[in-house]
Image: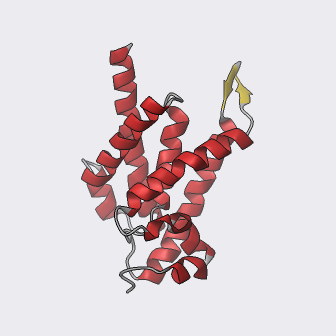
């Protein structure tokens, strides 16, 4: 069991590099927050690189959504492999789940810094506190899918809260 991964561990296998958020999982404090923050420049880059798609007469970031789904699938593999290699299925240094969840949140949240900051803090709250059923999912689902899925549910809670606040504010 590896309690504290090293930069050498991150670079030893592509799955480690991904699961540990390109090295942000090595942050000595709050590696989940570091991974969540990594989602911002990654989202801006992907949004800039990927063209929006016309769908039912509306322009939507369909390609970006596809990339996020792909990142989720890659995360299932990377987190399963890295958890096995670390000896802890959901090691705190593995933060690709936070990256992918925050990418989804950014995709569906109004594109301005005030909403993004609100969504960031709401997501961190839901990810840390793990209200039902997030905690139960975290305990019941094992392997890479379990690592990735509980953060997706936290993202869903965040998006519900964003929608509620947006509706209240008009």
State left or right for residue 129 relative to residue 58. left
Name the one closer to the observer, 5 or 27.
27
- State the image coordinates of residue 105 (x, y, percent, origin top left): 48, 40
Q: Is residue 125 above or below residue 169?
A: below
Q: Position of residue 144 (x, y in %)?
A: 47, 66
| 63 or 23, nearer to the observer | 23
Image location (x, y in percent) of residue 157: 35, 39
Give the x, y percent position of residue 71.
59, 55
Q: What's the residue at 59%, 82% (across, down)?
A: 12
170 relative to 136 in the view: left or right: right
Q: Who's the residue at 66% across and 45% down the image?
A: 46
Whether residue 79 appears in this view of the structure is yes
Q: How many marks?
A: 0
Q: Classify residue 92 by image quadrant.
A: bottom left
Q: Is residue 98 visible?
A: no
Q: Is residue 21 above or below residue 156?
A: below
As drawn, which residue projects farthest toward the bottom?
A: 1
Q: Quadrant of the N terminus?
A: bottom left
81 w.r.t. 62: above or below: below
Q: Residue furthest top?
A: 170
The residue nearer to you, when weighing 13 against 55, is: 13
Q: Residue at x 69, y 24 (%)?
A: 59
């Amino acid at each position: 069991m590896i309690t504290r991964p090293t930069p050498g561990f991150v670079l030893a296998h592509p799955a480690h590099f991904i699961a540990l958020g390109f090295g942000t999982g090595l942050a000595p404090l709050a590696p989940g927050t570091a991974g969540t923050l990594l989602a911002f420049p990654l989202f801006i880059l992907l949004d800039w690189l990927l063209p929006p798609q016309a769908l039912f007469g509306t322009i939507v970031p369909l390609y970006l959504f596809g990339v996020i789904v792909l990142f989720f699938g890659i995360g299932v593999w990377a987190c399963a492999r890295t958890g096995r290699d670390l000896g802890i299925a959901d090691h705190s240094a593995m933060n690709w789940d936070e990256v992918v969840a925050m990418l989804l949140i950014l995709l569906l949240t109004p594109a301005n810094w005030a909403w993004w900051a609100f969504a960031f803090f709401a997501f961190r709250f839901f990810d840390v506190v793990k209200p039902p059923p997030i905690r139960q999912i975290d305990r019941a689902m094992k392997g890479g899918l379990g690592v990735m899925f509980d953060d997706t549910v936290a993202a869903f809670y965040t998006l519900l809260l964003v929608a509620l606040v947006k509706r209240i504010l008009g």
